[in-house]
Image: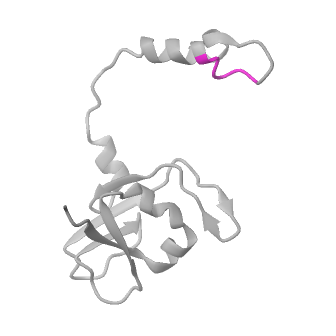
Amino acid sequence: MNTPMPLALPEALLRASPAMVAFWPECRLTPWDGRGAPDRLALPMGMAAPPGVRELWSFTPAPWRPPRFGARETPVALICAQGSDPIATALAVAVPAQDHTAHLALLAEARLGGPSGLPDPGGAALGM
């Protein structure tokens, strides 16, 4: 059995967003109190890492603002990459062209996009 690799995240972030463990299922998340330099560290984009960190991961929920419940946040998606700018890293990767006809047919079949109880507005009403 493989031991999950440790990944440190700021202690306050883990308290405010306990769902962060879902974004790194292959890791064992450990709280980082801001002192010292853990081997692997994940920080919100723009937060400076201490000297001596061997592997830095940056992440941001942008453009998806997480819902807040008091002092807690529940991010629904993260852009994460090694280095300091996860958005630039994600944008630098070419996405292959795909035919989305099957996906659009599933959306139409499930009647997604229309208010509950009303007729489906159809793709044209959604700008497709």
Q: Is residue 98 left or right of residue 108?
A: left
Q: Position of residue 64 (x, y in %)?
A: 54, 48
Badge count: 0
* Relative height, residue 8 to residue 115 (above, below): below
> What is the chief secondary structure element of the magenta stretch?
loop
Q: Position of residue 69 (x, y in %)?
A: 69, 63
* Relative height, residue 92 to residue 6 (above, below): above
**Which residue in the rendered view is the most extreme toward the right?**
117
- Image quarter of the C terminus: top right
Quadrant housing residue 110: top right
Q: Position of residue 1 (x, y in %)?
A: 19, 61
Does the magenta portion include 114? Answer: yes
Magenta residues (range):
110-115
**Which residue in the rendered view is the most extreme toward the bottom?**
35
Q: Position of residue 73 (x, y in %)?
A: 60, 63
Q: Is residue 43 left or right of residue 97?
A: right
- The residue positioned 33% from the left and 69% from the top of the image is 28
Front in this rendered view, residue 78 or 90? 78
Quadrant housing residue 21: bottom left
- The residue positioned 71% from the left and 13% from the top of the image is 120
